[in-house]
Amino acid sequence: MLPYEDLGFAKVDHHRTLRKGFPEVIFGQGKSPDQIVAIAEALLQASDRFLVTKAAPEAAEAVQARISDATYDDQARIIAVDRRKEPNLVSGVVVVSGGTSDLSVASEAVLTAELMDCEVRRVDDVGVAGIHRLLDNLPVIQKARVVVAIAGMEGALPSVLGGLVRVPVIAVPTSVGYGANFGGLAALLAMLNSCAPGVTVVNIDNGFGAGYLAALIVNGSVK
Amino acid sequence: MLPYEDLGFAKVDHHRTLRKGFPEVIFGQGKSPDQIVAIAEALLQASDRFLVTKAAPEAAEAVQARISDATYDDQARIIAVDRRKEPNLVSGVVVVSGGTSDLSVASEAVLTAELMDCEVRRVDDVGVAGIHRLLDNLPVIQKARVVVAIAGMEGALPSVLGGLVRVPVIAVPTSVGYGANFGGLAALLAMLNSCAPGVTVVNIDNGFGAGYLAALIVNGSVK
Amino acid sequence: MLPYEDLGFAKVDHHRTLRKGFPEVIFGQGKSPDQIVAIAEALLQASDRFLVTKAAPEAAEAVQARISDATYDDQARIIAVDRRKEPNLVSGVVVVSGGTSDLSVASEAVLTAELMDCEVRRVDDVGVAGIHRLLDNLPVIQKARVVVAIAGMEGALPSVLGGLVRVPVIAVPTSVGYGANFGGLAALLAMLNSCAPGVTVVNIDNGFGAGYLAALIVNGSVK
Amino acid sequence: MLPYEDLGFAKVDHHRTLRKGFPEVIFGQGKSPDQIVAIAEALLQASDRFLVTKAAPEAAEAVQARISDATYDDQARIIAVDRRKEPNLVSGVVVVSGGTSDLSVASEAVLTAELMDCEVRRVDDVGVAGIHRLLDNLPVIQKARVVVAIAGMEGALPSVLGGLVRVPVIAVPTSVGYGANFGGLAALLAMLNSCAPGVTVVNIDNGFGAGYLAALIVNGSVK
Amino acid sequence: MLPYEDLGFAKVDHHRTLRKGFPEVIFGQGKSPDQIVAIAEALLQASDRFLVTKAAPEAAEAVQARISDATYDDQARIIAVDRRKEPNLVSGVVVVSGGTSDLSVASEAVLTAELMDCEVRRVDDVGVAGIHRLLDNLPVIQKARVVVAIAGMEGALPSVLGGLVRVPVIAVPTSVGYGANFGGLAALLAMLNSCAPGVTVVNIDNGFGAGYLAALIVNGSVK
Amino acid sequence: MLPYEDLGFAKVDHHRTLRKGFPEVIFGQGKSPDQIVAIAEALLQASDRFLVTKAAPEAAEAVQARISDATYDDQARIIAVDRRKEPNLVSGVVVVSGGTSDLSVASEAVLTAELMDCEVRRVDDVGVAGIHRLLDNLPVIQKARVVVAIAGMEGALPSVLGGLVRVPVIAVPTSVGYGANFGGLAALLAMLNSCAPGVTVVNIDNGFGAGYLAALIVNGSVK
Amino acid sequence: MLPYEDLGFAKVDHHRTLRKGFPEVIFGQGKSPDQIVAIAEALLQASDRFLVTKAAPEAAEAVQARISDATYDDQARIIAVDRRKEPNLVSGVVVVSGGTSDLSVASEAVLTAELMDCEVRRVDDVGVAGIHRLLDNLPVIQKARVVVAIAGMEGALPSVLGGLVRVPVIAVPTSVGYGANFGGLAALLAMLNSCAPGVTVVNIDNGFGAGYLAALIVNGSVK
Amino acid sequence: MLPYEDLGFAKVDHHRTLRKGFPEVIFGQGKSPDQIVAIAEALLQASDRFLVTKAAPEAAEAVQARISDATYDDQARIIAVDRRKEPNLVSGVVVVSGGTSDLSVASEAVLTAELMDCEVRRVDDVGVAGIHRLLDNLPVIQKARVVVAIAGMEGALPSVLGGLVRVPVIAVPTSVGYGANFGGLAALLAMLNSCAPGVTVVNIDNGFGAGYLAALIVNGSVK
C-alpha cells in the first residue's frame, strides 16, 4: 500500500522518498503561498529535506513565517529546508555555465545537487566566445563524473565539453538572449542536435532537473 | 424565425437555449465590464442561468453591482447566475487533474458542468509522476460516464486514463509549465497524439469547453 | 599532441578513444559509401570497434565488401565491427519501448550500448495505453541502474517510468505518429516537460545517443 | 491479473476488451506486414473483431493471405475482420465531411464506428463555401446524438455545426490543402479555437479516433 | 522629382497623395509622442487629412495639444484629423465582425474607410456560432461592393461570407482568443486556407489595412 | 430553393453561378480522375465554363478523354473548358511576377482571370534584385486597376509595388526558395507585414485565388 | 598563456583585444547593475573603451556613479566609455534604416561602429513604401564600402539595397510590427531569403552585431 | 538607361555586372533545363563568367550540350562557365566546415568565391566534437581576411571560430542532421544567436551566398 496524504487541493506523495530516493519536490509556479506552506508542513513531517523550485519571494516569506529554518535563494528562486545530520557527501558533479546571465540557472542546479548529498564544483562564465577560459579550467572539469553544462544564446558549450570529457554531459539551455533566441528555443535545439556523444538535454532553464539527474548519476556510481 | 436581441455592440442570441439546450455563454476576455453587464441583463430576461468565462475581477464587480445573485469564483474566473429551481442533476462526470497548479482550469470545468445540471466528482493532484495516487482513485474514476482529464507540462494524464476507462476522456491541456512548454503547446500536442483510443482534446486552458462537452455527453445518455 | 589522420575529405579522430573512452562514431547520413569505407578502414587501424549510425543499405554493402567482419542491422540501420576479445560486460541498462513501431530506435540504443561493454535488457511494447503491461515488467525495470525509455506519439512513457524508478531515465522521442505529431515534435516536447524528476532527453529517433549515454552512466558507476 | 500475450516484438493486450469494451486496435504505420499478421492472429484468438488503421496495401495482402475473411478498404486504409453475429446496432452517429478530398478520413470514421456496433449516417461534401448544402441536410444532422465533423483547409465546418446542434461535435481536421495549410495545422488550430460550445478535436486525419469516440458516446447513452 | 521633407528622424513623404491617392499614414507603435507630433505638423501642411494607427493615449494627448481638431478613438486607437470640405462619399463598404471582442479592429477599419471617402455600413457580432444572426443580416451584406470580415478564434466568418456574396471579401484575423489561438495565428491560417473563392487576407488585427483596401476597391469602381 | 446535384461522393453546387457570379471551381488535389470527370460532366450541364486547379496530368487525360474541348496547361496545372461565345472582356488586371521560377503560379492567376472575362497583361521576372527592370515596366503596371504581385524567397515585390501604385495589390507568396524559406512561409509573412497600404495576401502558391479576386475587383468596377 | 581575470561570477577576458582587436563587449540583459559595474571596472584597467548593450537605465546609473566619463544613450540602450586619444577614423560604413520605429536599432549599430574607429553616415526612414526616398539617397549609399540595412515589418530594404550596391549588405531585422510579425520573425526570414547576392543577416534587433561586423569589414579593407 | 534583355519568360539583367561587379547568377531550382540554357546563352554574350546554383544534373547536361566549356560539379550542384583570362586572384578567404556531410555546401562556397577572383583555402571536418582538429588548423584560419564557417547539427563552429579570429565570420547553417534539426533550423538559430561578435549568417545550405559575400569582402579590402 503506497501512502499519500490528501490535503484536498493536493495529494502529498509521502512514498516518494522510498520510490525515488528523494522526497517530492514542489514546482512553485502557479501555486499560492498558502498552498505551498500547507504542502511544506505535510512533507516535513516525513522527511528531513524540502525543496520548492521557481518560487516567488512572497511564497518564500510565507514559508519562512511558518518554518523558521527555511532558506530562500533569490537568484535560484529556491526555497529549501535542510535538516540532514552529517550527510555523506559524494563528489563528482561539476556545474559549468556560459555567462554571467546564466548564473540563476546554475545556482538552481548547484543547490539541488547539494541537497541530494553531492559536493558540487562550479565553473562559471566560460562560454565559447573565449574558449581559453574553458580550456584553462579543463583540469577541474575533467575530474568530474558528470558535467552539467548551462548556456543560453547559441548553446554551444555542451557540444564543446562533450568532445572533451568522457562522462555524461547534462545540457541545460537557458532563456538568456533575445530576438531569434525565442525564449531559449535556439539553445534547446542546438543542444538536442549536439554532434558530441554523451550529451543529453533537460528543459529550458531547468537547473533543478539537471542537478537532480547529476546527483542520481554520481550517487548511483558510488553504491 | 430565430430571435436575437440587438444591443448595438452585440446581438444577444436568445434562441441559443432552444437550439443548443443551454443559453449563450459569454467569453469575458476583450469585453468591457459595461458590455458584460448589458449582455447579462439582456440574457437573464429569457434564461434562468448566466455564465461568463475568463472574467476579470472588475467585470465581476460590475455585474454584481447590478445583479445581486451573481457569483464570482476567482480561481475559475467565472461569473455565474443560477436561478434554477430544484434542478434534476445527472451524475457521471468526473474531473481529474494532474497537479495543484491545474486547479483553476479544473474548477472552470466543474462549475460549468454543474450549471448544466451535472453532479460532478473531482479527483485532484493525481499526476503521472506518482501514479499510485491515480490508481488508488480508480474506483471513483471508473464509475464515470465521461472523464475530464486536465494536465499541464507533458500532458500524459489523459493517455494513462484513456487506457484504463471505457468511457470518453476529454483532455484539457493547461499552460502550466515553463520553457519548452510554450504556453501549453507541449501538453496540447501530447494529448492530440494520445495512443489511447477514446481521448479527445479541447483548447489549452479550456476548462469551460470540457465541462460543457461532458455535460452534453451525460445528459444525452440519460434521455 | 592530439593525433588525427587527414583523409582530405575527413579528419579521422584517432585520439577520440583516449579522450572519450570510445572511438569516433560515424553519422552515416549525407556521406557516400566510399567516404564511409575510407573512414572505416582508417579507424579500424587503431581501434577494435567501429560504428556507423543512420546507415543506408548501400553503405553497408560497400563496407562489408571491404571489411569482412562488418555487420549490418537493417532495423537499427547500424553498421558495426566488433573485434573485442572477451569484453568485460557491465549490466544495468534496461531499454524500454512503447510500441512495435519504435523497435528500430530501440535496437539502435541496444546495439550501441552492447558495443560499449554493456549487457542490455529490453522490454518492448509497454506503452501507457495498456499500463498493466508496464507494471507487470516493473521487477525487471526497477533493477536497472539506468533506463532508456523510447516512445513516439504522446511520449508519456518516460514520465510514467520516471515516477517509478530511482535511477536516471533517458527519454528518446521517436517520429512514430502522424498529423500533429510533427515528426516527433509532440513526443519531444512532452519529454522535455516531464513532471517526473530524473528524466532527460536526447534528439528525436536518437537511439544511439541514448545507448551511448546509458553506457557512460553504468560504466562510470562500476569504476 | 491482467492478461497479455508476449510475441517478443509485441505484447498483445487481450485484456483490452474487458477494460475498454473493444479489442486492441493496431496502428499500421511503421509495422512490417509480418508483424501485423502475427498480431492479427494472436488477437483473433480472443476476439470477434480486428482493426488495423493507416495500413498499406502490402500489409492488407499479407493479412488476407492468412485470414481469409479480412477486408481492406483502400480509401480508408483500414484492414478489418468482423465476426460478430447479429450485432445489436445503435443509431445516432452522423459523419459529416466538407469536401470530396476528405472522403478517406470520413470513411475511416464510418468503418470504425460501424465495427463498434453503430449504424452510421453520412453526409458528404457540405463544406461552408456552399452553406445551403449543409442547411439542406440539417434534418438528418439534427437527429444525431453525436456528430463527427471532418474538414480540411480552414476547418470551419465544426464551428458552423456546433452552432446548430445540441449534441457533441467531434471535429477532425484533415491534411487536405496546400501552402499555409501546413499539413492540416490550419484546420487543427481553427477547430481548437471554435467559438461554438460542444466542439472537441482529435488529431489531424484521425478518422479512427473520431469514430471510436462517437461510438463510445452513443453506446454509453443507450445503456 | 518626387518631394519629401526631411525631419532628421523621418522623411515625410509629401508625394504620397499623388502617388497613392491618400497621404502617408503613420504607424504609431514605436514612435515617441514628440515624433508623431512633428510628423503630423509636417504632413498637415500639404494635406487635408491625417491618420495615426495603433496610437497610445499619450500620443493622442500630445497631438491634440498642438492640433486642436485632432480626434482620438480609444477603441480603434486611431488619431485622426479630417479637414475635408463636403467630401463626395462612396457607398458599398460593409464591415462585418464576429464578436464583441473584435470591435476595436472593426472600428479601425470603419474609421479608415470613412476618412477615405467611404460611407460604411457595419454589422457586428454575427459570428458563426449563431449563424441565424448572420443570415438575418444578409440583405445588408449582399448589397456591398466589398465586404470586410473580421473574426478571431477560429476565423470562420470570411469563409461563410465568401460562399454567400459575389464581391471581394477582405478577411481580418484578430488576436481575440487564448491558448492555441497563438495571438491570432489560428484565425490567420484559417482565413488563408479559405475554401471560398474571392477571400483575401491582411495581417492580424490590421483593421486599417482592410479599411484602406476596401476604400481602394469601391473608389476604383466608381471612377 | 437552392439547387445542387448529389453525386454521392460530391454535391455539385449548380447555384454557385447565381450566388457568386462564377461556377464552382474544383480543387484537384486529393480527388481521383474519375471523381473529377464526374463533377466536370455534371457542372458543364449548367455552365459554359469549367476550371480545375492543382490538377495532375492523369486527371487532365481522364477529363480530356470525355470532354473533347477541355484544355490542360501543365505549367499552371489547370484543366479548363471554355464555351463562352464572344465574351465581353474587361481590362485592368496586371499580373507581375518576381522570377522565372514563379511562372507556374503566375500562369494560374492569368488563366483564372481570363476565364472570368478579364484581359490580362503580365510582366514577368521583375524581382527586386534588379529593380530597374521593375521601374522600366511601371508605365504598364500603373495603368492597372488591380495588380497581382507574385514572388517567392523574401517576397518583397508586393511592398515595392504597393508604394508605387494607387490600386489594390494582391500579393501571392510562392514556395520558391529553400532553407529558411520553409515552403513559402518567409514570403507569406513578409507580405502580411507589408508597410505599403493597399496590399492584401492570399495563400502560398494560390495563383487561382489572386486571379479570381482580381477579376471580381475589375468586374465590379465596370458595372 | 591567455590572460583573464576571475571575478567569481565572471571571468573577464583581458586577452580579447589581442585576439579580436576589440575589448570584450558586455551583454547587459540578465546582469545586475552591480555585476556590470564590477566588470566595467575590471575591463577599463586594460582597455581604453567599454561597451554594454541592451542596458537598462538602472545599470547606466550604477556605472555612471562609479565611472564618471561613462555615457548612456537611452534610445540605443548602450553604456559606453571612450578614452581613445585622436582615433584614426575609417570611413565607408553607411547605416540605412526603414522607418522611424527602427531608430533605436540603427543607433545601436552607429554607436558600436563609431567606437570601433569608424566614421559612420546614416540614412534614416527610407523604407520601400516610398522608394523615391531611397533612390534619392543612393549617391550617399553607393559610396559605402559596407551597408547596414535595418528594417522591421516585411524586411524588404536589404533586398532592394542588395540589388543596387556592389558591397556587402548587413541586414538587421527589427521587432517593429505586430500580428504576423511574430517579434521580428517575418523580417528575419525575409532577409535570410533575399534574392540579392551579397546580403547577410544578424539576429533580430542586433544593431550591435551589425555595427561590429561593418567595422571589421572596413577596418580590414584599409590595412 | 539600364539595359536588360527580355526573353519573354525572363528579363536578363546585363547591367548587373556594372551595378554589382559580377554578372547575374541563376538560381537553378524551379527552372526548366531549356530556360536555363536560354538564359545562359543570353548572359554569356555580355560576360566572361556564368554560374547556376542548386542545378539538377539534367540542367547541366542541357547546358553542356550547347555550351561546350560549361562544367558541372555534382557535389556543389553548380554549373559554371569560366572564360576569364589570367584573373588577378585575391587571397584571404578560408572556408571551414564541420563534417564530411557538409562538403557539398562547402564546395558551393569555394567554387563561387573562386569564380569571383578569390584564391580559397579550405579546412574540412573540424567540427567542435574534436576541437583539437580545429585548434591544430588555427594557423591557417587565423591568416584569413574572412572566414566562411559551415556546420549542420548544433551549428557551434562559427561561435567557436568567432572567438578566435579578428575578421568577419560568415556562418552557413546546413540541413545536415535529423529529428529536432528541423531541416537546418537548429543550426540557423544557433548561429543567429552567436555570443561571439563578428559572426553573421546566410540562409540554410546557402554556400553560394557565403562565398559571394566573402569575395566581396576580400575584394573590397584590396582596392
Image (cartoon, coloured by chain):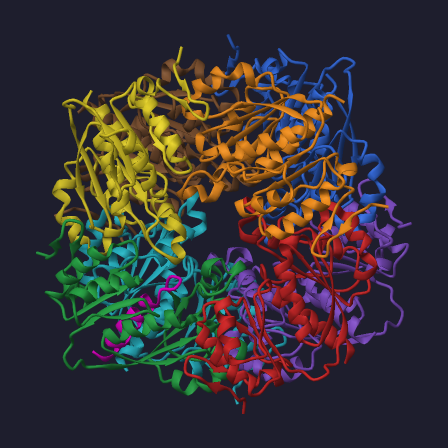
Chain colours: A green, B yellow, C cyan, D brown, E orange, F blue, G red, H purple
On the image, the x and y values in percent for residue F170 come to: 67, 35
Q: Is residue H59 visible?
A: yes
Of D220 and D201, nearer the camera is: D201
Q: Is residue B12 above or below residue B191?
A: above
**F69 on left or right of D112:** right
Of E136 and D167, nearer the camera is: E136
Of G146 and C15, nearer the camera is: G146
Residue drawn at (63%, 72%) of the image: H198
Residue drawn at (28%, 28%) of the image: B50
Q: Main secondary structure of the magenta part?
A: helix
On the image, the x and y values in percent for residue E110 come to: 58, 29
Q: Is residue H94 visible?
A: no
**F172 on left or right of B117:** right
Residues in magenta? A202-223
Residue drawn at (45%, 44%) of the image: E182
- Residue F213 sits in which quadrant? top right
- Residue C76 sits in which quadrant? bottom left
**C65 on left or right of C111:** right
- Residue F149 sits in which quadrant? top right
Of E90 and A164, nearer the camera is: E90
Name of the residue lying farthest toward the top: F1
Quadrant placement of the C terminus of chain D: top left
H175 inside magenta stretch: no
Name of the residue lying farthest toward the left: A1
On the image, the x and y values in percent for residue A27 come to: 27, 59
